[in-house]
């Protein structure tokens, strides 16, 4: 049941047997975060009645939780002179820090070998990427994330990290793909939390956490390529940001309408939006994967996007003539999208549907 790749080290924690031959192990009760402190309180040894050794940075549990696992009325002495009181293990005297106990049967079918160890080399890994600077106090280790990813049978799924921080998950996905030939994809989500002006990250030019994560993905990808020259994996990624709609607000009272306002509403797209902004809105509307291959070409001087091998073609330039429309229609895309104000003149607008009916009648045409 437990003989799975990567779980051997965790198994070694469960090296004791109770009277029913059930394996159990001792779990360290020290506060796990090296930058903060946990609660501090006294725990009495069940036999000597003296205060036991405390963790340097405090206990992992608060006093109420600890007491709920501790039972001085049920003291079991073991062959080595140690004691078990409820779910707490004590050494033979008060000079050793108590531990909680956990049975192997309670861990579950898949025992990850870290269990999960907070003490890691995540900071060192980040320093190796950023020339000796970590920028994060407790980044997740790549080895841990690789272990979690490898615990799944599939090697081509999507992995979503809603608190991506320094983008360790993305680093691990690329590393594992390079090692086993997988095709895993990552989605990193992170609020653009600003860095402290006195921090090393800010001084290095990273004004928010997202900038650190993006640069880590770039550097990690290049490093993996250098270390695995024969590996075939995709190190590319796209950066998308939440924003308001690309479309102008067109809600006005009848009394507000005038000639100038009507002229301004001829183009219903906000002036500061780029062609890429419009393209990704269309991709979202049509359910096209944002990771899809996008090719950018030029037809008669107009920029044309081709997404996912002709599944979607789009052109958001102005003054599009029949030559451009015809060239696109001949490629027979499944979808074609353009701006309502893009056509060069009324003649092009009149012939638009006829051109597609002639060369690609199955194409679904949409106008923004």
Image (spheres, rainbow, N blue to C red):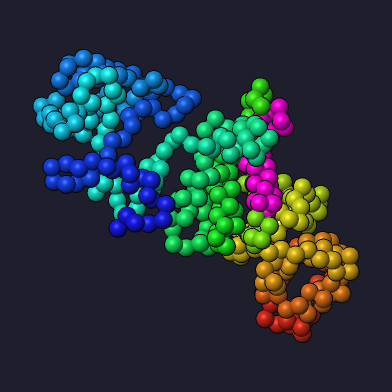
Say which quarter of the image contains residue 335: bottom right
Badge count: 0
- Residue placed furthest toward the right: 300
Q: Which of 311 and 207 is in front in this view?
A: 207
- Residue placed furthest toward the front: 80
Q: Which of 331 and 228 is in front in this view?
A: 228
User: Left or right of 208: which side holds 350?
Assistant: right
Q: Where is residue 151 in the image (x, y as percent from the top left)?
A: 43, 55
Q: Give the range drawn in magenta.
A: 201-227
Q: Can residue 175 be seen in this view?
A: yes
- Residue placed furthest toward the bottom: 358
Q: Nearer the viewer, residue 203 or 141?
A: 141
Q: Is residue 282 visible?
A: no
- Residue placed furthest toward the top: 50
Question: Any magenta on residue 217?
Answer: yes
User: Left or right of 144: which side holds 267?
Assistant: right
User: Left or right of 246: which side holds 48?
Assistant: left
Q: Where is residue 155 in the image (x, y as percent from the top left)?
A: 51, 62
Q: Residue at x 29, y 51 (%)?
A: 108
Question: Any magenta on residue 108?
Answer: no
Rendered-image quadrant of the C terminus: bottom right
Rendered-image quadrant of the N terminus: bottom left
Q: Which residue is drawn at 38% across and 46% down?
A: 9
Say if 169 sits above or below 193 in the image.
Answer: below
Q: Which residue is drawn at 29% across and 24% down?
A: 97
Q: Which secondary structure is most common in the magenta stretch?
A: helix
Say if 158 sits above or below 69 in the image.
Answer: below
Say if 53 sits above or below 207 in the image.
Answer: above
Q: Where is residue 142 in the image (x, y as percent from the top left)?
A: 53, 45
Q: Where is residue 10 in the image (x, y as percent from the top left)?
A: 36, 45
């Amino acid at each position: 049941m437990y003989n799975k790749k990567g779980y051997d080290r965790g198994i070694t924690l469960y090296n004791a047997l109770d009277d029913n031959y059930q394996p159990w192990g001792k779990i360290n009760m020290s506060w796990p975060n090296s930058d903060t402190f946990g609660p501090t309180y006294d725990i009495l040894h069940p036999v000597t009645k003296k205060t036991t050794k405390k963790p340097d940075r405090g206990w992992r549990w608060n006093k109420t939780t600890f007491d709920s696992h501790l039972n001085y009325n049920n003291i079991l002495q073991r062959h080595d002179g140690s004691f078990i009181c409820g779910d707490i293990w004590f050494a033979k005297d008060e000079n050793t820090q108590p531990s909680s106990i956990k049975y192997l049967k309670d861990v579950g079918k898949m025992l990850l070998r870290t269990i999960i160890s907070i003490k890691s080399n995540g900071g060192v890994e980040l320093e190796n990427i950023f020339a000796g600077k970590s920028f994060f106090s407790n980044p997740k280790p790549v080895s841990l994330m690789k272990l979690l990813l490898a615990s799944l049978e599939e090697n081509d799924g999507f992995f979503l990290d809603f608190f991506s921080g320094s983008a360790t998950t993305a680093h691990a996905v690329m590393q594992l793909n390079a090692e086993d030939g997988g095709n895993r994809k990552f989605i990193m989500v992170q609020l653009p939390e600003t860095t402290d002006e006195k921090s090393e990250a800010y001084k290095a030019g990273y004004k928010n956490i997202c900038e650190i994560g993006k640069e880590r993905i770039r550097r990690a990808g290049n490093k993996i390529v250098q270390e695995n020259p024969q590996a075939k994996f995709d190190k590319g990624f796209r950066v998308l940001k939440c924003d308001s709609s690309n479309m102008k607000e067109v809600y006005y009272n009848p009394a507000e309408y005038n000639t100038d306002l009507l002229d301004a509403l001829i183009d219903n797209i906000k002036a500061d939006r780029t062609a890429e902004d419009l393209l990704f809105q269309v991709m979202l509307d049509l359910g096209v994967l944002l990771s899809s291959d996008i090719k950018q070409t030029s037809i008669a001087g107009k920029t044309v996007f081709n997404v996912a091998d002709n599944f979607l073609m789009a052109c958001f330039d102005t003054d599009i003539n029949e030559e451009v429309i015809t060239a696109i229609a001949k490629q027979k895309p499944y979808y074609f999208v353009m701006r309502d104000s893009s056509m060069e003149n009324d003649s092009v607008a009149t012939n638009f549907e006829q051109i597609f009916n002639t060369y690609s009648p199955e194409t679904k045409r949409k106008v923004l």
